[in-house]
């Protein structure tokens, strides 16, 4: 297991010109957020401290804090509350990632061993709970219950989305609408909430906050479709995480759903048979079929359309470098290898 | 697996005269709380709904809601906020139980199959998260952030206690003070918080609320010591849950810590050898030793002293049926078989 440095959005060099410049408007605030995250995730118990710091490293790309801070800056000023909220959403997201890695029995995340492979499932479960709890507690240090309420609503839907997804394991007749409803809940809810909180705490009115929320939702759906495509056809080395877990865990995602739709019933039954019984080489017969029916292309196109819709949600907002970054992020989420 | 009816405190008949009458002062409110809990844990997704309802059944003895409501009633009036808070603390507690059962690989809880044995670890992890999230969201529907803050603080300590306990697995030289610090965090924090919230939301002043919190803390410690004794020498049929998991998971608890203290070094090393290598019959050589050194008696006596101290914390409070129940509950928690 290679313990390479994990990379946040800010550190990624895949498309250096776009990506670095995207976060330029909130560079300073992202550094403050990182400091707050590190300060929050501290314990005087050595074992707890080690685990928690590791969990913080293994966290996401900082996409949600970036969205929150860019939304804030494009509406008005980044305030202390925004840094708190950015820390909260990242903790919630990291908690779900760590619990997901137990469920997926994934070995790698952001070029690091997952918590469950470095320690065990027990450590992962407890660390996820610790992060959830600290996130909610941190949200409660703000003046009103609004952030707690919005974040609580979002995490309710995230959890329900995860449970729904579990309920559809091995259901290869899942249709696109159900798939979209699941990723809307498990992924897009938190990106929508991040954008809404960013706008709201910068003084946005209700209709502006709703635009940001809609932007975050469409962006989250585009992001998740792209993520699911990566899980099927991505490169583990570039992605820095275990791939192919969706097939292994019998999670039907958009390319497969599309393929199923295009096959006739006997072909469909054959493929289901392969998917249900196939060992690790399940992908072999699948990939040529996905190609033949352009099912990957279809999914990528759907992701692009959500990304494009996200971009247009901000059309009426006043121009600013932060707004431009949000618009360009919609391009990034569907054109990434990690 | 027997799917007998699970029993709340109110339904237990072990010591019928005391127990039923203990909850008499809040009988009506407990019923309202049960209704709110059931209403909160509903989903229009059939799989989610089934799982969540089961989780609600498998929950605790409703000790924490009972403490919260009795504290409220002994201080003043039970209000709507108390019912909300009782639901919140029970959800948090149930979430930790469900995650604990994954960690302990326990098969039975409250005479029912645990979620992980009836479904799987994945269902348990997601259901626990769902309950945590709903608990925090529900707390945020109250007027101020106070409840969110107090509950967030408590769950932070609960999670830290669980992680500390994990860090001491197999450490048979753990001393009594460290053991007490761990159970103070993982168990007593939430019983203390329940009592404090009950008192506070009934209009208690700061020093009264602190008395209730101290009562809840001592009661929680007594409860956990008694629980750990039950895990060693209890009767599974009466307890309605898998026992012996502490030894299996190499969790040193008070009777064992006491025994280790009394042995000389060669005996201690012999015993550690047995505990580390022993198969399921680990208990066989241990039980006679625990008896010989009166280590169980010692632990029970410690539990009694905490219970007694809890009782005295309420000495200055004005007499009422609810207060009398709280005083008598201290007796119940150390003299139970389930």
Image: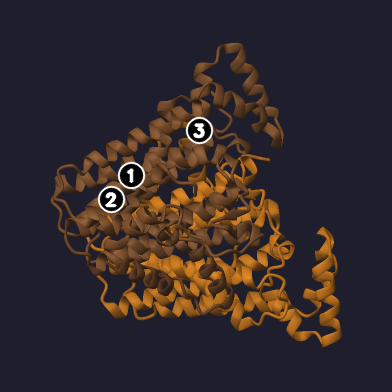
Chain colours: A orange, B brown
Residue located 36% across and 65% down the image:
B137
Q: What residue is disc 2 on?
A: B326
Residue ranking furthest to the bottom: A264
Residue B123, horizontal then vertical, whole percent: 60, 62
Between B56 and B283, the one nearer to me in the picture: B283
Q: What residue is disc 3 on?
A: B253
Q: Is B264 displayed left or right of B8 in the figure?
A: right
Q: What residue is disc 1 on?
A: B330
Of the numbered discs 2 and 3, the one sitting upstream in the chain is 3
Q: Secondary structure beneath disc 2?
A: helix
Q: Secondary structure beneath disc 1?
A: helix
The image quarter in which residue B51 lies: bottom right
Q: Quadrant of the N terminus of chain A?
A: top right
Spatial separation of the CA atoms under disc 2 and disc 3: 26 Å
Q: Quadrant of the C terminus of chain A?
A: bottom right
Q: Rate crowding at label 3 as few (under 14), some (14 to 19) or many (20 or more) other CA atoms within 10 Å.
A: many
Residue A200, horizontal then vertical, whole percent: 29, 69
Query: Where is A47 relative to A243, above or below?
Result: above
Which of the chains bears the disc numbered 2? B
Query: Where is A83 relative to B49, above or below?
Result: above
Residue located 74% across and 62% down the image:
A248
Residue B13, horizontal then vertical, whole percent: 45, 57
Query: Where is A41 relative to A316, above or below?
Result: above
Camera-near label (1 vs 3) is 1
The image quarter in which residue A82 lies: bottom left
| Residue contact between numbered discs 1 and 2, judged by CB atoms under 8 Å | yes
Between A35 and A120, the one nearer to me in the picture: A120
């Amino acid at each position: 297991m290679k313990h390479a440095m994990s990379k946040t959005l800010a550190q990624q060099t895949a498309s250096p010109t776009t990506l670095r410049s995207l976060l330029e408007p909130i560079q300073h605030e992202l550094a403050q957020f990182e400091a707050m995250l590190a300060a929050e995730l501290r314990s005087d118990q050595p074992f707890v401290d080690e685990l928690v710091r590791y969990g913080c490293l293994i966290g996401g790309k900082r996409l949600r804090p970036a969205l929150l801070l860019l939304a804030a800056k494009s509406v008005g000023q980044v305030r202390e509350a925004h840094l708190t909220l950015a820390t909260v959403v990242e903790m919630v997201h990291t908690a779900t990632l760590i619990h997901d890695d137990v469920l997926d029995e994934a070995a790698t995340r952001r070029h690091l061993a997952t918590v469950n492979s470095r320690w065990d499932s027990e450590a992962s479960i407890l660390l996820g709970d610790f992060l959830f709890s600290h996130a909610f507690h941190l949200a409660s240090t703000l003046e009103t219950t609004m952030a707690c309420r919005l974040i609580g609503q979002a995490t309710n839907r995230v959890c329900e989305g995860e449970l729904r997804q579990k309920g559809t394991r091995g259901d290869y007749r899942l249709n696109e609408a159900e798939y979209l409803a699941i990723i809307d809940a498990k992924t897009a809810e938190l990106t929508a909430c991040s954008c809404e909180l960013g706008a709201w705490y910068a003084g946005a009115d209700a209709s502006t906050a709703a635009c940001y929320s809609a932007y975050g939702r469409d962006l989250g759906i585009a992001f998740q479709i792209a993520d699911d495509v990566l899980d099927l056809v991505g490169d583990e080395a570039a992605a820095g995480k275990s791939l192919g877990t969706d097939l292994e865990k019998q999670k039907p995602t958009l390319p497969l759903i599309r393929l199923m739709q295009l096959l006739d019933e006997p072909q469909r039954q054959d493929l289901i048979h392969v998917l249900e019984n196939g060992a690790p080489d399940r992908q072999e017969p699948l990939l040529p079929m996905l190609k033949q029916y352009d099912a990957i292309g279809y999914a990528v196109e759907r992701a692009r359309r959500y990304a494009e819709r996200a971009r247009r949600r901000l059309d009426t907002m006043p121009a600013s470098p932060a707004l431009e970054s949000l618009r360009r992020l919609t391009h990034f989420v569907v054109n990434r290898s990690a």
